[in-house]
Image (tube, rainbow, N blue to C red):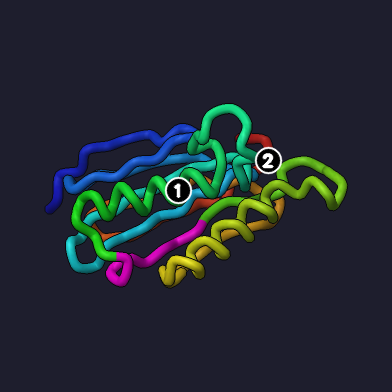
Amino acid sequence: MTQYLQHFLYPSSLFVSKEPYLVKTILGSCVAICLWDSRLRIGGINHYMLPTWNGNDLASPKYGNVATDKLIDRLVFHGSRIQDLQAKIFGGGEMMESNTKTLIGERNIRLARIILEERGIPIVASSTGGKRGRKIIFFTDTGEVRHKLLEKKTL
């Protein structure tokens, strides 16, 4: 049985490891993309809050376009090839009532799908949208993701 190191992934961050890790995070309107390399059996995950960086301030992984590019780059640095990667997307719930112009969760989901399609990385699973948060656990060595929908009061 594999001994897993554990890591809690905070918003605006990402994590990649060649070692078997169990990575946990909690999502509301944020999105997490889990990438797994089927050849090397390594994985990585990001957790971003907003869809796109506007060019002001720092290019932080708070933004989906920055976080996803950095996640892909880090996996490639560890020896992954784009054609060996597969993706799973989670989160993007609309946790607060808002007008249609500010649907952050929906915009975060759309950005993830666009970037992965542009990079040629297939999305093999997803649990996105809705009105509830999610807790996810990502196993970096197998690509498995366990997720649970949360009641609003637990966020």
Q: Determine the main secondary structure of the stretch shown in magenta.
A: strand
Give the residue pinned by disc 2: 152
User: Could you tell whether 145 is left or right of 63 in the image?
Assistant: left
> In the rendered view of the protein, which quadrant contains the C terminus?
top right
User: Could you tell whether 19 is left or right of 127 in the image?
Assistant: left
Q: Earlier in the sequence, mark 2 or mark 1?
A: 1
At 31% across and 60% down in the image, what residue appears? 36
Q: Position of residue 53 (x, y in %)?
A: 60, 41
Q: Secondary structure at mark 2?
A: helix
Q: Which mark is residue 136?
A: 1
Image height check: is 88 above or below 45?
below
Residue 124 in view: no
Image height check: is 135 above or below 143?
above
Quadrant of res 22: top left
User: Could you tell whether 91 is left or right of 40 in the image?
Assistant: right
Magenta-colored span: 82-89
Q: Is residue 7 magenta?
A: no
Q: CA distance from mark 2 to mark 1?
A: 16 Å
Q: Amino acid at mark 2?
A: Lys
At 32% across and 35% down in the image, what residue appears? 7
Circle 2: is it few (<14), some (14-19), or many (20+) Cα within 10 Å?
few
Q: Nearer the viewer, residue 126 or 14?
A: 14
At 50% across and 69% down in the image, what residue appears? 117
Residue found at the very far front of the displayed protein? 55
Q: Position of residue 138 (x, y in %)?
A: 36, 51
Residue 64 in view: yes
Q: Amino acid at mark 1?
A: Ile
Circle 1: is it few (<14), some (14-19), or many (20+) Cα within 10 Å?
many
Q: Nearer the viewer, residue 2 or 94?
A: 94
Q: Which mark is residue 40?
A: none
At 50% across and 34% down in the image, what residue appears? 60
Residue found at the very far left of the displayed protein? 1
